[in-house]
Amino acid sequence: MTIHEARTEEQIRACHTVMVQLRPHLADPDVFTRQVLRQMEQGYRLAFTITEDGEAAAVAGYRILESLSWGKYLYVDDLATDTSLRSQGHGQALLSYLKQTALDENCGQLHLDSGVQRYEAHRFYLRERLLITAHHFAIKLQE
C-alpha cells in the first residue's frame, strides 16, 4: 500500500472526507484546508492512503517535535481510517509509515493521544504494540 504526503491544497482537500470523521468540527472543507495549511507552517504533515478509485482511505497528521521529557519524537495529531474501509490494512500501513518516518528523522519515540471513548482505536493501538504510558489532562480556557 502506497503512502502519500499531502502537499497541495487539492491533496489536503482530498483528505477531508476521512478527517472529518475524526474531527467533525471541521465539517467545512475550506476551513479544514486553511487550518492544515496554517499548521503546515508549524511543521504539521499530512499523510494518506488511497483506494483503488483514488479516494482517500486513511489519513495521519503528525509532527516531529523535541522535548525535555522524550527527546526528539514523532507526535501523531490525527489518525483515522474511513469507517467503511476499516480492517483493510490502511491504518496499519499508515502507522508503519509513521514509525519508519520517526526512525528516518532520528526520533527515539512515537506518541499519540486518543480520546477515552475510542475503544476500537485503542484495540488497534494495543495490537500494534503501542503502550498506554500516561494520562492526558486538559482544561478548556476559552469557549
Image: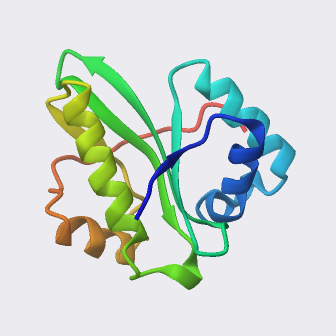
Q: Is residue 1 above or below residue 14?
A: below
User: Can you give x and y, in whole percent of width and height, for residue 62 in the image?
Assistant: 44, 38
Question: Taking 118 as reference, is 7 above or below it?
Answer: above
Question: Depth check: 36 or 13 in front?
Answer: 13
On the rendered image, what quadrant is the C terminus found in? top right
State the image coordinates of residue 133 (x, y, percent, origin top left): 15, 49
- Residue 21 figure quarter: bottom right
Percent position (x, y) of residue 109? Answer: 18, 36
Residue 58: percent from the left, percent from the top?
Answer: 52, 63
Rendered residue at 18%/72% (across/down):
127
Q: How many marks?
A: 0
Residue at image position (71%, 64%) is 17
Residue 102 in the figure: left or right of residue 20: left
Q: Is residue 13 left or right of residue 2?
A: right
61 is higher (above) or lower (below) than 90: above
Horizontal arrangement in the rendering, residue 132 relative to residue 50 (left or right) = left
Rendered residue at 44%/40% (across/down):
138
Question: Along the line of sight, which residue is nearer the eye, 73 or 25?
Answer: 73
Residue at left 32%, top 46%?
Answer: 98
> What is the quadrant of residue 108 in the picture?
top left
